[in-house]
Amino acid sequence: MNTIDFVGEHAQTFDVRWHCHDVWEMVYCTGGEGRFYFENGTVLPYQEGEAVAVPPGELHSNVSEEGFTNIHLQMDDPTFPYKTAFRVTDDADRHLREAFRQAKYYYLSDIRRSDLVLSALGELIVSYMVVFRSNSDYSEPVEQIRSQILRRYAEPGFALDEAIRALPFHYDYLRKLFKKEVGATPLEYLTQMRMKKAGALLTARGARDYTVSEVALLCGFDDALYFSRVFKKFYGVSPSAYASAGKKGKGDPNLK
């Protein structure tokens, strides 16, 4: 189970014609965007940082106007709880991408017993894809906004309003729809993602301690003072107080 049988890579490609496999195929987009078309009429759009899983015997094609690059692998009997094709969009920290990259490396490697690592990567990739699978409870425009936030929340230059206005819907309609389905506005959701990462960085017990300015930048803020104000409003304490309490084993102080 979860054994990787094949790993390949596409350089820039525009059209993969109709075909099917006897096994599951998992495709991780490393660049560009496109659409998977299926014989039953299903269309799964994807972009860089997303993956699509295709079950055995499912006739499909892959089309892109601008071209795409990807890493693709095949598994004979993955332990997916699904029977149909699905998309994974929540790889915000690129854990799945790294697992695909390592699978390609060890599949092609002549390192002794590399099959042991490849076997472990197969288990990891299946687990990631189940955990990160796109939530089907969200409508397509809401899922597109969520995907952008999850992929880009740590970028100081990420312009959320521009990303929303680029979609072919009225801005206020999208904002209300997002609030209805997610339970927070797009900006509130973006702030939650940034604050969650900030809290983790401030209390991490690793090889080094991050300064408040470093944490701010890593969480998408180019202004440390503004970051501190947002952080205190969200958690109820300053970043330095939060870090001190967390590293003393007191948990998340005043966590909302």
Image (spheres, helix red, strand yellow):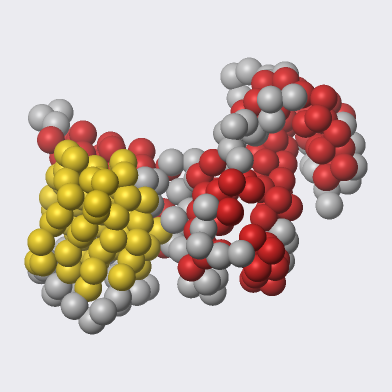
Please name the residue shown 44% across and 62% down the image: 133
> With 193 as the anchor, is 167 left or right in this view?
left
Task: Find residue 25 and report its horizontal and vertical position in percent.
Answer: 20, 60
Q: Residue furthest bottom?
A: 40
In terms of depth relative to the viewer, which is nearer, 144 or 170? 170
> With 108 as the anchor, is 161 left or right in this view?
right
Task: Find residue 240 and report its horizontal and vertical position in percent.
Answer: 83, 26
Please name the residue shown 22% across and 73% down the image: 38
> Splitting the image into 4 quarters, where does residue 170 fall?
bottom right
Please name the residue shown 48% across and 72% down the image: 136
Can residue 67 be seen at all in this image of the molecule? yes
Task: Find residue 45 and report its horizontal and vertical position in percent.
Answer: 35, 61
Task: Find residue 72 and report its horizontal and vertical position in percent.
Answer: 21, 50
Q: Is residue 157 above or below residue 37?
A: above
Q: Is residue 213 above or below residue 24?
A: above
Can residue 116 be seen at all in this image of the molecule? no
Q: Is residue 52 above or below residue 31?
A: below
In terms of depth relative to the viewer, which is nearer, 130 or 172? 172
> With 197 as the anchor, is 37 left or right in this view?
left
Q: How many marks?
A: 0
Q: Quadrant of the N terminus?
A: bottom left
In terms of depth relative to the viewer, which is nearer, 216 or 1? 216
